[in-house]
Amino acid sequence: MPELQRLRADHAPAVLAFELANRAYFAASVTDRGDAYFDQFADRFGALLAEQEAGVCVFHVLVAGDGPVLGRFNLYDIEDGAAELGYRVAQHAAGRGVATSTVRELCRLAATRYGLRTLRAGTSRANVASQRVLAKAGFVPVDPADPADPADLAAPLDPAGFGGQPGTWFRRDLDDASRAAAGPPGRC
């Protein structure tokens, strides 16, 4: 059974294999990371671990029972009880409920372990599968609001991250009971 694990240094080879194996699949819906990402993978991976240690982000991998990474599920830009959620799932695991169940689990962790109150996630308007995953996980689309207000969770999504396609923000306010069970917010 797959297990959601917090990212560790020893995940690096499996994460690189996951990214390489699914590069073309991911590039069909989001901007390709480019050759430099893979050429400098070790440095970039180390930087992710440093961000996680600093409490700015929390990165997770969904690991199959036999070791390969099935997906990456992350909380970015953690600040003032809110964060952005991002994820990607291997092509061979898509369409099987893996993304939906793992996004739900990450929402639970966001509330109970990380003390977050609100999550947002963005997707291109053309990525209907991702929109379905977010809706099934309790996210709702939010209308664009004042883009000049950086605190506004409904600010328009920069389409550059989605291959130049227009995007939509989704938002989920996390359950108060789940947060209370976690105790006071702490460092990730």
Image: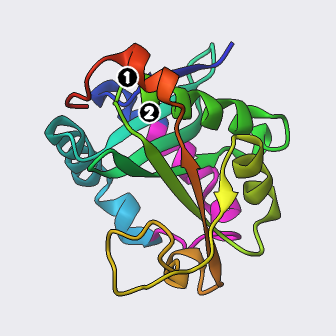
Q: Residues within 10 Å of mark 1 (few under 14, many from 20)?
A: many
Query: Residue 101 lies in what quarter of the image?
Result: top right
Q: Which residues are magenta?
A: 15-33
Report, in whole angstroms, how far the alpha carbon at label 2 lies from the one at label 1.
Answer: 6 Å
Question: Residue 63: percent from the left, percent from the top?
Answer: 56, 24
Q: Residue at x 75, y 67 (%)?
A: 127
- Using residue 80 as the reference point, say whether residue 85 is left or right of it: right
Question: Residue 37: percent from the left, percent from the top?
Answer: 37, 63
Q: Residues within 10 Å of mark 2 (few under 14, many from 20)?
A: many
**Main secondary structure found in the magenta portion:** helix
Q: What secondary structure is found at the residue carrying circle 2?
A: helix
Q: Which residue is mark 1?
A: 113
Query: Is residue 17 part of the magenta span, yes or no?
Result: yes
Specify the quadrant that holds the N terminus: top right
Specify the quadrant that holds the C terminus: top left
Between 74 and 151, the residue placed more toward the observer is 151
Question: Residue 112: percent from the left, percent from the top?
Answer: 42, 22
Question: Residue 38: percent from the left, percent from the top?
Answer: 39, 59
**What colouring method underlies this structural image?**
rainbow
For badge 1, the amino acid type reads: Arg
Give the vertical position of 100 relative to 79 (above or below): above
Q: Which residue is mark 2?
A: 110
Q: Residue at x 37, y 31 (%)?
A: 7
Q: Are marks 2 and 1 in contact (CB under 8 Å)?
A: yes
Q: What secondary structure is found at the residue carrying circle 1?
A: loop
For badge 2, the amino acid type reads: Ala
Q: Residue furthest right?
A: 95
Between 175 and 112, the residue placed more toward the observer is 175
Query: Is residue 10 part of the magenta span, yes or no?
Result: no
- Using residue 129 as the reference point, say whether residue 147 is left or right of it: left
